[in-house]
Image (cartoon, grey):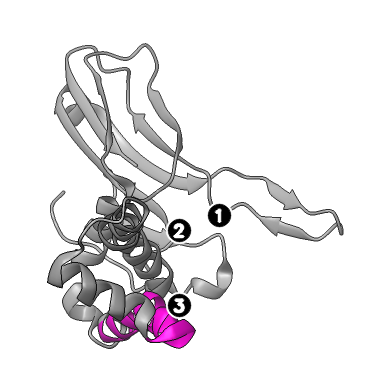
Amino acid sequence: MKGVYSDVIPLNARINIDYRGEKVGFAYPNKEESGKKRIHFSLILSPFIGWWVEKLTKYVFLPLAILGVFNLDMGLVGKVALFLTWGWGVGGFFISVFGIPAIAAMYVTLNYHKYSKWFPKFNMERQGGVWTKTFTSLESDTFELPLFDNVYLKYELVGEFAQFIDEVDVREHDFTYVDKDNHESPNELLWKASFKFSQPPKKGRMTVDFI
């Protein structure tokens, strides 16, 4: 089964791949996300701010702090960076930290059809790498990846793994959070992926990359 399948909202999506019926379906734990036609600005903004603050801290704030502690000459670049981040006072600081990612997030939101393939790669880069598992045989006709963040999932099936695959199903663990005020909210953060085969594959290979 070959093709490109996508949905509008790339966040916390259940995905079912039916190899027997050659169908791909999307659904969401949060029913408000189902059927939406546009990406939300807030969904883009949050990871942009996290990435931007991480880079500012690593390449601007921390070096400036070290230079200041040891009273070293910042040079022209350091002085410009210091002015841009602190020279405008509190307002300038917030513009530097939140304004720039907000502008970028708005641009991506308005042009999401151009960036729909890029944005998952951006989320992958923020995570710092993927986990990989490889199997050459299974004792059962079902393999479950018990816990991952549902940021990235790529698998390669070779031999009997490709021959016997029936279904791949990605969905959240079915439980509800209860806070101290007894308010309930469904889990949308902890996920699992199930690989279902017509019979246990004994020859070949299955490689799964995931975040």
Q: Residue at x 34, y 58 (%)?
A: 68
Query: Reading the chain from its start, which is encountered first: label 2 or label 3?
Result: 2
Question: Which residue bears the numbered disc 2?
Answer: 12
Q: Work out whether 117 lies above or below 201.
A: below
Tell me if residue 161 can be seen.
Answer: yes
Give the spatial CA distance, label 3 vs label 1: 17 Å
List the single residue furthest toward the right. 181
Membership of 104 in magenta stretch: yes
The amino acid at mark 2 is Asn
**Extent of the magenta region:** 88-107
Q: Main secondary structure of the magenta part?
A: helix
- Which of the two residues, 201 or 105, is positioned nearer the viewer here? 105
The percent position of residue 165, horizontal first and vertical second, equals 26, 32
Using the rendered view, name the quadrant where residue 121 is placed: bottom left
Describe residue 159's horizontal placement relative to residue 11 as left or right: left
Q: Is residue 33 left or right of residue 16?
A: right
* Contact check, label 3 and label 1, Cβ < 8 Å: no
| CA gap, disc 2 and disc 3 | 14 Å
* Vertical comparison of 20 with 181: above or below: above
Q: Earlier in the sequence, mark 3 or mark 1?
A: 3
> Residue, x 70% and y 50% (percent of image)?
176
- Residue named by callout 1: 188
- Amino acid type shown at disc 1: Glu
User: From this viewpoint, which residue is outermost toward the front?
Assistant: 71
- The residue beneath circle 3 is 42
